[in-house]
Amino acid sequence: MTRRLALILAALAALFAAPLATAAPPPAKLPALETAVFAGGCFWCMEHDMKGIRGVVSVESGYTGGHVDHPTYQDVTSETSGHYESVKVTFDPSKVDYGFILSRYWKLIDPTDDGGQFCDRGPSYRPAIFFANEAQRKAAEASKLDAQKALKQGKILTPILPLKTFWPAEEYHRDFAERNSDHYQRYRTGCGRDERLKQVWG
């Protein structure tokens, strides 16, 4: 009887120990992501170009800087809402820092033009950097000085502004370049974006 009890106890011990031995290790802690918001004319182009930066996790088209809640594309392009077409860039700071993203941003816009960008004219297409905190403001100001030195011509007119609410754009605007590649390439070429960037930055 004693031997049988010992065997039963041993079996029970093995039963309870098995899940502990085969349990998966705890999931790795995900990196703390950061965000940055920019305006640079057509948000299709800004979204497409910002996605190419290593360490950028996602780029979302939207609107910011205005006085209308939940603005639509029609509200923004009517030039009555005060919003800029903009993008929210989510990035992993362990792979890329805000300063590098700023340096890439400048090369994607014509910062000497404060009346729009390329063929898109009007306040909603103006370029701007929107800072979320004091560290971003200081980094943006320093980056602006560096960008001015790199310009081939003109003076930087792009403002650095406090971030207001970022409103996501309508679903059909998101990932536009990937989902409508032919339309996007015709638009980008016809708008003269890349030609003008070569003139400004060389």
Image (cartoon, rainbow, N blue to C red):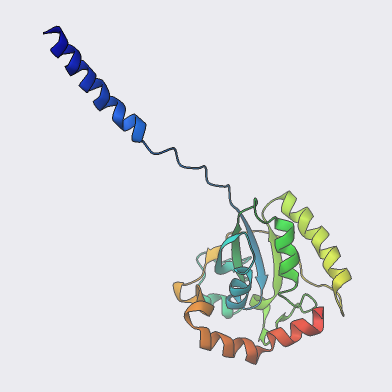
Q: Position of residue 151 (x, y in %)?
A: 85, 75
Whole-percent x, y for residue 143 in the image? 80, 62
Q: Is residue 80 visible?
A: no
The residue shown at (58%, 47%) is 32
Q: Quadrant of residue 164?
A: bottom right
> Measured from the top left, where is residue 57 in percent x and y?
56, 60
**Quadrant assignment, res 42:** bottom right
Q: Is residue 176 above or below residue 103?
A: below
State the image coordinates of residue 76 (x, y, percent, origin top left).
57, 75
Q: Residue at x 69, y 89 (%)?
A: 192
In this view, the residue in front, 144 or 101, is: 101
> At 47% from the left edge and 79% from the top edge, which residue is drawn?
179
Q: Is residue 32 left or right of residue 127?
A: left
Q: Quadrant of the C terminus?
A: bottom right
Q: Is residue 50 visible?
A: yes
Q: Quadrant of the N terminus?
A: top left
Q: Is residue 16 left or right of residue 42?
A: left
> Given the current orientation, which residue lies at the most extreme front position?
3
Residue 144 vs residue 44: left or right? right
Residue furthest out toward the top? 2
Disc tally is 0
Q: Nearer the viewer, residue 58 or 169?
A: 58
Image: 67 above or below 138: below
